[in-house]
Image (spheres, rainbow, N blue to C red):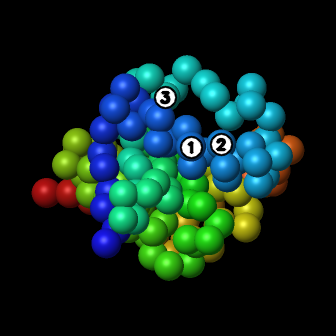
Amino acid sequence: MLKILLAEWARAGITAKHVRHAVFINEQKIAEEDEWDDHDENALHLVASLDGNPIGTARLTSDGIVGRMAVLDSFRNQGTGSAMMEQIIKTAKKSRMKELKLHAQRPAEGFYTKHGFIAEGEEFMEAGIPHIAMKLELMWQ
């Protein structure tokens, strides 16, 4: 059964690092210095696990920036990313955020569009990978 942990970096960091290292550094060949930044310590992290094994992660900053969303290759297209995004949106609404923003890798743009995000501006390169800025306006009561 898929479980999603929502936690601070001190609690989620070890498992989030495992997934991010596998996806961004090993698979996508992003340099370690581009992957690790100062935002982890102050962000809320999601770790998706299946039978106790971490398979996905993402982070949400207090100003509504979604980042470092990753699912291990063998678990993609099975609903893990969507479950994490639904949790991010729910958490953002509960925190009364007005919008979410992210930099989507171009191959993942359709995934974010499916969740209501809209592309903004021109394509740009980040860590050697084409990206597009995207935004989701949140409505809450």
Q: Which marked residue is nearer to the observer: mark 2 or mark 3? A: 2
Mark 2 or 3, nearer chain start? 2
The N terminus sits in image quarter: bottom left
Q: Which marked residue is nearer to the observer: mark 1 or mark 3? A: 1
Q: Which residue is mark 1?
A: 18
The C terminus sits in image quarter: bottom left
Q: Is residue 73 left or right of residue 26?
A: left
**Dot 1: what SS?**
helix
Q: Residue 17: x percent and y percent? A: 55, 38
| Distance of label 2 from label 3 (alpha carbons) | 14 Å
Residue sitting at x 57%, y 55%: 70
Residue type at mark 2 is: His
Q: Which mark is residue 21?
A: 2
Callout 1 touching callout 2 (CB < 8 Å): yes
Q: Which residue is mark 3?
A: 40
Q: Residue 123: x percent and y percent? A: 79, 54
Inspect this view and state whether residue 36 appears: yes
